[in-house]
Image: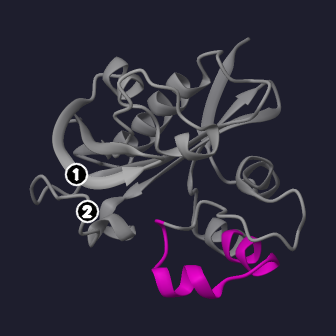
Amino acid sequence: MTVETRPATDFDDVRALVGPKRPDANVCWCLSYRIPSKLNNELQGPARGDYVAKLLEEGPLGVLAYDGDEPVGWAAVAPRADTTFSRNRKIPHVDDLPVWSLWCIRVRPGHRGKGITHALIAGAVDYARERGAPAVEAYPLDNQGAKVDQTMAYAGLRKNFEAAGFTHAADTTSRLSGFPRVVMRLDLR
């Protein structure tokens, strides 16, 4: 399988990865860290997808991985200043560098275990680099090899970021699915 990553601009492809199976369902749409909590809580059902469609009119929301024409993976990446990580009390700022955050990775069932996560991380880094990011941060689980519930693995795993050249930058007080999250960083300068 040859995987290609591209900026996430197509609504139907984004919906295939982060949208609901039922249009009225309240799924994340990968908005939880992208928009203020109050707005995130107010958007219900189809309004969430409508909001994503509106955001896509302004530009890509991350990167998608494709196997041919089929979207098989998603990675959310944006300047940290444009996310709720800019004021998150549990995930510290390492310094004042205007880093980009990579906070969500999703691979469709049936396509897992084929290296798509690695392609998504590399694609997100390339996307941020092309837009002038001095560094990319991620906030993955430090699961130390323990099994992680797939629904909570969206933050990624520390070992995958280490394999991509990221280094541990800080510990956090954030926990997800029982595991601590860490700040991993890749300097692009």
In the rendered view, tell whether residue 21 sits above or below residue 2.
Answer: below
The percent coordinates of residue 126 (x first, y second) are: 42, 34
Q: Nearer the viewer, residue 130 or 171?
A: 171
Q: Quadrant of the C terminus?
A: top left
Residue 189 visible somewhere in the drawing: no
Q: Kindly state the secondary structure of the residue where label 2 is placed.
A: loop
The percent coordinates of residue 96 (x first, y second) are: 11, 60
The image quarter in which residue 40 lies: bottom right
Do residues under tags 2 and 1 come within 8 Å of each other at their CB atoms?
yes
In the rendered view, tell whether residue 169 sits above or below residue 112.
Answer: below
Give the amino acid at mark 1. Answer: Thr
The percent coordinates of residue 144 (x first, y second) are: 35, 24
The residue singled out by tag 1 in the image is: 172
**Which residue shows up at 65% across the image and 15% down it?**
114
Dominant secondary-structure state across the stretch colored magenta: helix
Q: Kindly state the secondary structure of the residue where label 1 is placed.
A: strand
Magenta stretch bounds: 33-52
Q: Quadrant of the N terminus?
A: top right
Q: Residue furthest left?
A: 95
Q: How many marks?
A: 2
